[in-house]
Amino acid sequence: MNTQTKFATLAASALALSLSAAVSADDAMQGMDGMERCYGIALAGENDCAAGPGTSCEGTSTVDYQGNAWTYVAEGTCTTIETPYGNGSLEPVERP
């Protein structure tokens, strides 16, 4: 096997592995039975994911009730959860 073939095989393997990991992570984030994502209710550092630019995911929200950070709650309860800035939302919200 020549060097170019080895490199191509290695690159293809790395790409397949990274795509597989991305799909697995996305599947995990799709939700759990009986649960839904609720934005704007998590305390700082207690979000499940989606905490905005410059953050990696779980536990990375920087302020309480950050509007673009979500946490899982029982399905049908999100919009009834009250915060100092309004109720939880099924979509990201703008918060001061």
Image (spheres, helix red, strand yellow):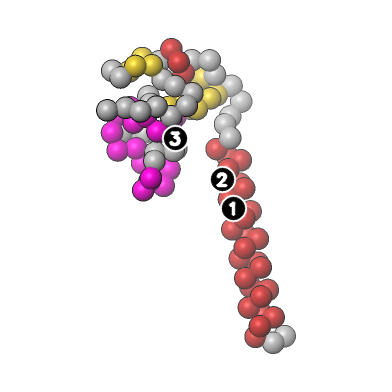
Residue 68 among magenta residues? yes
**Residue type, mark 3 in image:** Asp
**86 and 77: which is toward the camera:** 86
Do the residues under discs 1 and 2 have CB atoms within 8 angstroms? yes
Residue identifier under label 3 = 48
CA distance for labels 1 and 2: 6 Å
Residue beneath label 1, please? 21
Q: Amino acid at mark 2?
A: Ala
Q: Is residue 58 left or right of residue 11?
A: left
Name the residue rendered at 44%, 35% in the picture.
48
Q: Secondary structure at mark 2?
A: helix
Within 10 Å of disc 1 (Cα), the crowding (few <14, some 14-19, many 20+) is few
Q: Give the structural element (helix, strand or loop) at label 3.
A: loop
Magenta residues (range): 53-71
Label of residue 25 in the image: 2
Which residue is at a point 66% across and 83% down the rendered structure image?
4
Label 1 amino acid?
Ala
Q: Quadrant of the C terminus?
A: top left
User: In the shown orientation, is residue 31 left or right of residue 12?
Assistant: left
Image x and y of residue 14, in percent: 61, 65
Residue at 49 percent of width and 23 percent of height: 90
